[in-house]
Each structure stands twice: as C-alpha cells, then as structure tokens.
Amino acid sequence: MSLLELKALLPQLLMVLGATVVLVAGAWVRNRRLWLLTGLVLALGAAFIAGTVEPPVAEVAGMFSTSLYARFCTIAWSLVIAATLLLSGRYADLHRYGGGEYTSLLLFAGTGMSLLSAATSFLGLFLSLEAFTLVLYILIAFNRVDNLGAEAGLKYLVFGAVATGFIAFGIALIYTASGTLHIAEALAALQVDGAMRPLGLAGWALMLVAIGFKISLVPFHFWTPDVYQGAPAPVGGVMATAAKGAVLAAFLPLLDGLGVAGGEIKQVLWLLAILTMLVGTFSALSQTNLKRMLAYSSVTHMGYLLIALLIGGADGGQALLFYLVVYSFATFGAFGVITSWALEDGEVQNYDDLRGLGYLHPRRSSALALFMLSLAGVPPLAGFFGKFGIFHAALQHGYLELALIGVFASLVSLYYYLRPIIVLFMQERDAHQLRSGSGEEFVLLAGCCVATLFFGIYPGPLLDLIMTLLP
C-alpha cells in the first residue's frame, strides 16, 4: 500500500490506531472519563478529516473507495460513535465499565462501519462487515453482571456466525461465476444477455440471508428484540442506527450495479419489504417494554428502507440516505433518553416504570415524545418527510402496493408510538426513583431534538447535499 493510499485512509487509520493506543494505555491508566474524552476527540477528528482533506487517490488497494459518498458515510458513522461516547459518561460510571476497553471497541466498530460503506471489493466488504460485527458481540455483553446482556450477546453471536457462513459462501459463488472479487467487475461479469448467471444468482440468494440478518429483515429478525433489550442502551443506539445504516449504504451501489439483471433479486426484496413492514408493525403493537418496541420499530423501518433500495438510482438513493439520517436522529435520541434514565440496578424500560415520569422529568420525557412522533411520521417532524420521500418515489416508479402497505403500517404504528407518550404523562410518581440527567446527556438530546425539528421544517440543505453525493 502506497503513502498516497495511506493518506486516503487517514480517518480510518486515526480511529483504529487511536483505538489501539487507548486499549493498551487503558490497562495502565484506569480513568474512564479520560479515555471516553479521548475517543470522542478521535471520532470527531476522523469526521473532520473525512470532510476537509481531499483524498489523493480514488480507490485504496482495489478494495475501498474514497468518493464523496464514502466520505459522507465516514462522517456520519464517526459522529454516531462520538455521540455514543458523549452519552456514555454517566452510564459507564454507573456500571463501572473499563473506559479504555469500551472506548476502543466503539472506535474499532466505527472504523469497520466506515470501511464497509466504502467497499468496492467483496473481500473488503466481508472483512469490514465482520470487523464491526465482532466488536458488537463484545459490546452487547459488556456488562458482565447482567444476565440479559450475556444472553443477548450469545444470541447475536450464534445468529451472526450463521450469517457469516452465508455471506462467505455467497461471495465464493459470485467469485466462481465472475472470476473477480471487485464489485463493479463482478456484477458486470454475472450478467449474460440481460439475465444473471445461475451460480451468481445462488450467491446473491445466500448474501441476502446474511444481509437480512444484519438489518433485521423478516424472517431473519428473531434476534432483534432480545438483543436490543439486553444490550446496554448506548450500544443499542449504535446497532439501531450506524450498524444497520452502514450495511444499507454498502448495499445501495451493489443493487444499482445489477441493472436489469437484478430483476429476480428485486422480486425477493419486494416480498421481504412487505413482510418486514407488516410483521414489524404488528409485533410492536403488543410490546410493553420500550426497548423491545424500538426493536420491532427498527424492523418496520428497515422495510421502508427496502422500498428505497428497490427504487434505486438517484431517487431511491436520495430517499434512502435522507431517511437514514432522520431515522438515526430520532432512534439514537430515544436510546439516549433510556440511557439518561438508567439506574445502577438496570435501565428503565417497562411501561409500568415509565408511568408518570413526564411530570418529574419533563425535558427528557418531552424529548422522548418528540422522537416517538418523528418515528411515527407526524408532520412537521423530519420523520414525516423521510416517509413522504420514500412513498412518493415508490409511486413514481410503479411500486403502488409497497407505498400503500407502507402508509398502512405507518398509520398502525401511531398506536405503539403514542402509547409510551400517554404512559409518561398519565400520573405522578415518587421523584427519588430516577437520577437527574448529566450535562452531556442533555447536550446530546437537545442536538437530536433540534435536528429532528430542523430537517422536518427545512429539509432542503440535507437533500441538496445528498444529491451531490450520488453518482
């Protein structure tokens, strides 16, 4: 690898080398706040470099792109990691986390997500996908005294190992059919007279199983509620936003590259989108645990995003990236509220424990209500315009059935998004049961609220930015 290629990977190198230093130094200096702050600076530095330093080469080692699209994803996932570290200060103190280990794992995860979104080779895609998935196995079960966390980590590990086998075998079949691991060349070689080679089609089928697991598509979603419930709330926020977003961002150019030969793949995705929206919506209706409801909510939102993937092109890409951004603000904000309410003996998740908190903690309760309404798609919040963009693009491109089912799922979702809001403001309760939020938590929640309102009222700048990123 040349010096120019190393310079092009400067944001990722900053995070991964910084993570290594923090991991080693954290064994000698047991100061979790110091390492959380160090990780925050490293993640913000990576985002700053990705946004300001022009890469000297277009591709690194034939595996990773340095395009505007890849740099935008690097900025997005680095900021999510920075937000997670900012959010984790009091939470890490409560549960006595090792600051060095926790910080380094999050930085490693951010590096893997960044490289995955920039992958131009199936080898790079596989390595980067597994790099951050391996980190998530540890982060989910990071609280060693929490039995739910250990169970969640084991479930994710088992399902993840199976998914790894599927994607590895799928890539092997695609390589056999095309003779190359470079994505653009492989996709071109898979097409014969406007159709896909049978071996390549089998490889894609196996890859869809793995991708379905990573982003919780039905019927590969069974791990999601248990893992979300058992994982630490800050880690759950990363999984629901950056981890799934990185997979979708990598999959968008893949599907576009198939062209007309991807007809069979799109038929499967059409069916998966319908199943995911309906099953996720109706499964969320009966939940009485906020994190499990958010898990099924994320399943439903992945169904909406599949519609954008099916549309493809500039319209689909714009709808997908805009929705990802606004969905991430609302979802991460919701997990941020759960984090800020955490106690030493666990997190406040059940609706019975939320009853009346709106009177005692009005700012955080109001923020949670705002995030729920945005996820439900209530105007003028950003979630409404995200859904409107996807459904409008679906109608323009002939996906009437998907648009109608998406609108139906959104209407039904009002019930399970309004339910925690009603519970929060139903009756008063004793004030001593919850701690006051920290300054860092309030800063993060305020930022998510402002972004949710701003991009709902004035989405133009973000839409214009996204259009400049797409080829």
Image (cartoon, grey):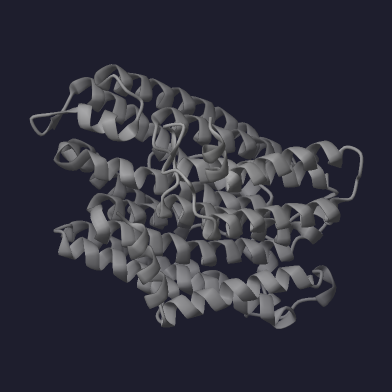
Q: Quadrant of the C terminus?
A: bottom left
Q: Is residue 216 in view from this perspective?
A: no
Where 243 falls versus 340 (above or below)?
above
Q: Nearer the viewer, residue 42 or 223?
A: 42
Q: How many marks?
A: 0
Spot occupied by residue 339 in the image (x, y as percentages of width and height): 70, 61
Spot occupied by residue 17 in the image (x, y as percentages of width and height): 70, 40
350 displayed left or right of 388: right
Spot occupied by residue 135 in the image (x, y as percentages of width and height): 64, 37
Quadrant of res 139: top right
Spot occupied by residue 270 in the image (x, y as percentages of width and height): 24, 47
Q: Nearer the viewer, residue 136 or 83?
A: 83
Q: Nearer the viewer, residue 229 or 195?
A: 195
Q: Is residue 196 in view from this perspective?
A: yes
**Residue shown at the point (59%, 66%) measured from the top left:** 333
**Residue shown at the point (74%, 57%) measured from the top left:** 88
Quadrant of res 343: bottom right
